């Protein structure tokens, strides 16, 4: 009976095309096929200025918690913990009321970055440490972002993923959190928030710490787009990210004084993983071939950006050095360094070295943009959507529609290729298919 229920939930989530909505994009049905002891809701939302998970949870707490219960049923987990920052007092109050009588614990987290990192969250909520280079399941845990849980509950009621929840913050007329049709352009999203409030602006997609800067506002919102932050092009963060990689490494080579703050504040290092960006920085000065042999301390880096954007007193780019080192080591076919032992033990100073979000925002120069971005119900009527066939971890999905086909909102347009890791894709509007290539375009003609 239990197995049948598990299969039904997994099938519904697979049908609906649910993927990790926090940015990872891992197909959720695969996670739900596993057996676990814990289901964790990741509501930590530690990227500065992004609030969409808290806003969604306030607006639809019952559905988010339903997603947790379904995940428990599917994985056989008997413990469920909702990780959320204590500062979200309104959301916490709503959650506590909604969890009344349910077997779900609300775990309050301090306001630091990156509290939402899976390794950090699992440790905070269960006291367990994921083995180096491993996944939460290895310590009996399945982690879903709050929006993913909402989508799981929707899937169980037969509704596929056709909308994306995101926050628009920074230099826009009305910062807000909202659900928009998957496939509309970033330009349309900014327009829904009242448009940019300045003339020369740049847009971060997915966050200031781990997101990307883009100048292509015609790119579509996908199932993993976490939010947009509009900043003046002259902003220090924009200018810093525009530094050419070669220049980042050249400056690092001459200016790094090996103070090792980048390592001492690294959240993964503090959990006990052998990530040591200051040692990776040393290799910038190596000119002989084989320097990748000495860059192994980058291998367990999660690219959180804390070293580059917060810890380094010289404003250098240790994260970018780690990115380069990881790529070089891959090219050289070197085995991933997992550290001297699989017995990870958190640093004795781990709790005292958290990067408070308030200090991080000050350092980033975005404190003035830290304003509420409340939930806005909107009924935006998209005329055209572009649905990339690859908006998840795995291989691209396979289009099952052709140019000229008429489709309804919610209709399947791309299927998981037989035996592969991927996620189904559904139309977010009613219209006619006008293009099929690496994306399916649908227009209201
Ligand atoms: S914090 Fe900056 S200066 Fe210090 S070791 Fe790291 S990269 Fe070098
Ligand atoms: S980006 Fe820097 S701080 Fe973050 S995990 Fe990598 S080395 Fe550590």
Image (cartoon, rainbow, N blue to C red):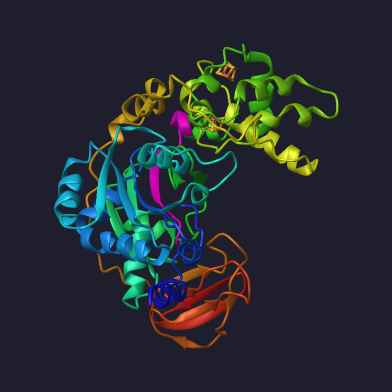
Q: Is residue 13 above or below residue 401?
A: above
Farthest residue, direction bottom:
405
Residue at x 43%, y 74% (from the top left corner): 3
Residue at x 50%, y 52% (from the top left corner): 137
Q: x, y percentage for residue 180?
A: 34, 64
Q: x, y percentage for residue 212?
A: 51, 44
Q: Nearer the viewer, residue 229 or 163?
A: 163
State which image quarter holds ligand 2: top right
Q: Is residue 96 above or below residue 392?
A: above
Q: Nearer the viewer, residue 130 or 424?
A: 130
The answer to if 224 sits in the magenta stretch is yes
Q: Is residue 148 at all visible to an observer of this figure?
A: yes
Q: How many marks?
A: 0
- Left or right? Give the position of 307 relative to 376: right
On the rendered image, what quadrant is the N terminus found in? bottom left
Q: x, y percentage for residue 72?
A: 35, 61
The answer to if 304 sits in the magenta stretch is no
- Left or right? Give the position of 286 relative to 94: right
Q: Is residue 325 above or below residue 6?
A: above
- In the image, which residues are magenta? 223-237
Q: Is residue 405 above or below residue 413?
A: below
On the rendered image, what quadrant is the C terminus found in? bottom left
Farthest residue, direction front:
1
> Which corner quadrant of the image does residue 101 belong to?
bottom left
Residue at x 75%, y 19% (from the top left corner): 285
Q: Nearer the viewer, residue 144 or 206?
A: 144
> Which corner quadrant of the image does residue 357 belong to?
top left
Q: x, y percentage for residue 123?
A: 42, 38
Residue at x 49%, y 48% (from the top left corner): 136
């Amino acid at each position: 009976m239990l197995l049948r229920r598990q299969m039904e939930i997994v099938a519904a989530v697979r049908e609906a095309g649910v993927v990790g909505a926090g940015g990872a994009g891992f197909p959720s049905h695969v996670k739900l096929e596993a057996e676990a002891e814990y289901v964790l809701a990741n509501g930590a939302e530690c990227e500065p200025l992004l609030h969409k998970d808290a806003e969604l949870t306030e607006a639809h707490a019952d559905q988010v918690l339903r997603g947790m219960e379904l995940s428990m049923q599917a994985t056989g987990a008997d413990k469920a913990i909702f990780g959320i920052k204590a500062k979200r007092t309104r959301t916490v109050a709503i959650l506590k009321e909604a969890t009344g009588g349910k077997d779900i614990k609300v775990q309050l987290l301090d306001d630091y970055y990156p509290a939402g990192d899976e390794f950090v969250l699992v440790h905070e909520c269960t006291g367990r440490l994921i083995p180096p280079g491993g996944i939460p399941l290895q310590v009996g845990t399945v982690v879903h972002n709050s929006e993913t849980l909402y989508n799981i509950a929707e899937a169980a009621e037969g509704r596929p993923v056709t909308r994306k929840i995101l926050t628009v913050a920074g230099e826009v007329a009305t910062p807000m959190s909202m659900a928009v049709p998957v496939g509309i352009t970033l330009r349309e999203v900014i327009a829904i928030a009242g448009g940019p409030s300045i003339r020369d602006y740049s847009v971060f997609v997915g966050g200031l710490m781990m997101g990307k800067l883009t100048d292509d506002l015609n790119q579509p919102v996908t199932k993993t787009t976490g939010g947009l932050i509009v900043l003046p092009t002259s902003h220090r963060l924009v200018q810093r990210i525009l530094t050419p990689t070669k220049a980042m490494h050249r400056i690092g080579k001459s200016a790094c004084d090996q103070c090792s703050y980048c390592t001492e504040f690294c959240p993964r290092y503090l959990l006990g993983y052998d990530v040591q960006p200051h040692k990776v920085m040393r290799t910038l000065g190596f000119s002989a071939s084989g320097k990748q042999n000495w860059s192994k301390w980058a291998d367990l880096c999660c690219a959180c950006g804390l070293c580059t954007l917060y810890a380094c007193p010289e404003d250098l780019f240790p994260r970018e050095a780690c990115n380069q080192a990881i790529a070089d080591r891959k090219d050289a076919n070197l085995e991933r360094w997992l550290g001297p032992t699989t017995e990870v033990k958190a640093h004795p100073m781990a709790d005292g070295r958290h990067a408070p979000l308030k200090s991080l925002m000050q350092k980033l120069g975005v404190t003035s943009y830290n304003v509420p971005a409340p939930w806005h119900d909107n009924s935006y009527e998209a005329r055209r959507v572009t649905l990339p066939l690859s908006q998840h971890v795995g291989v691209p999905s396979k289009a099952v529609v052709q140019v000229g086909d008429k489709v309804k909102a919610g209709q399947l347009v791309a299927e998981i290729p037989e035996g592969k890791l991927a996620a189904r894709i559904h139309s977010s509007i009613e219209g006619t298919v006008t293009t099929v290539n690496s994306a399916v375009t649908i227009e209201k003609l």
